[in-house]
Amino acid sequence: MIKRIIFVSIFVIMIRSISFAEDFLLSSPQLEPGKNLGMEQVFSGFGCTGKNISPALSWKGSPAETKSFAVTVYDPDAPTGSGWWHWAIFNISAKINNLAENAGDPSSKSAPEGSIQSITDFGRAGYGGACPPVGDKPHRYIFTVFALDVEKLPLDANASGAMVGYYLNKHALAKATITVYYSR
């Protein structure tokens, strides 16, 4: 009987966690899930001629225990053996639920106060848009917002995408994603 009660309790907790995570949603006026990325979000360089502007993002339904947020953009299809980190911004206050368009440009000063944008695989901080190899299959660009159980990650602007990813996964309460595609 006690084993059954424990099992049912664990099952209920798991179901609540899963349904709660499903309530955490990410949206953007510039990104349509499953569709192609616009030229505004494409990189300017490496042979790509986009505008390299990070999209506006907003989220809702984060867990009550959320102490901060982080946003990443990752391309798992990059031919590197480890994907490509296009953006990592973290230590976003739990009071914030959006990023303005072009917040990924550190010189624009439009990222939330106290947030940190770390090094991408382009070798610099801030948003780096899509730029897959010519003729490659469409790449997936996964925009993810993480609700975290800590106010600040113990990282600075020199942290690699992989290191940021490690801490995000270690402290994630929930995450929400939008996946878009791009090829050239």
Image (cartoon, helix red, strand yellow):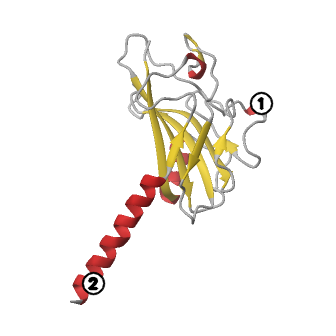
In the image, what residue type sits under mark 1? Ser
Instruction: Say which quadrant the C terminus sits in.
Output: top left
Residue 131, image x and y in percent?
Answer: 51, 19
Badge 1 marks a residue whose secondary structure is helix
Q: Which mark is residue 108?
A: 1
Q: Is residue 168 above or below residue 149?
A: above
The image quadrant that residue 107 belongs to is top right
Ranked by sequence position, the earlier of labels 2 and 1 is: 2
Q: Nearer the viewer, mark 2 or mark 1?
A: 2
Q: Foreground residue, 10 or 162?
A: 10
Secondary structure at numbered mark 2? helix
Compared across the picture, whether 87 is left or right of 139 comes to right
Query: Which one is nearer the viewer's eye here, 133 or 30?
Result: 30
**Amino acid under label 2?**
Ile
Residue 111 position by quadrant: top right
| Number of on-image labels | 2
Residue under the image location 68 percent in, 47 percent down: 156
* Image position, residue 171 (x, y; %): 52, 59
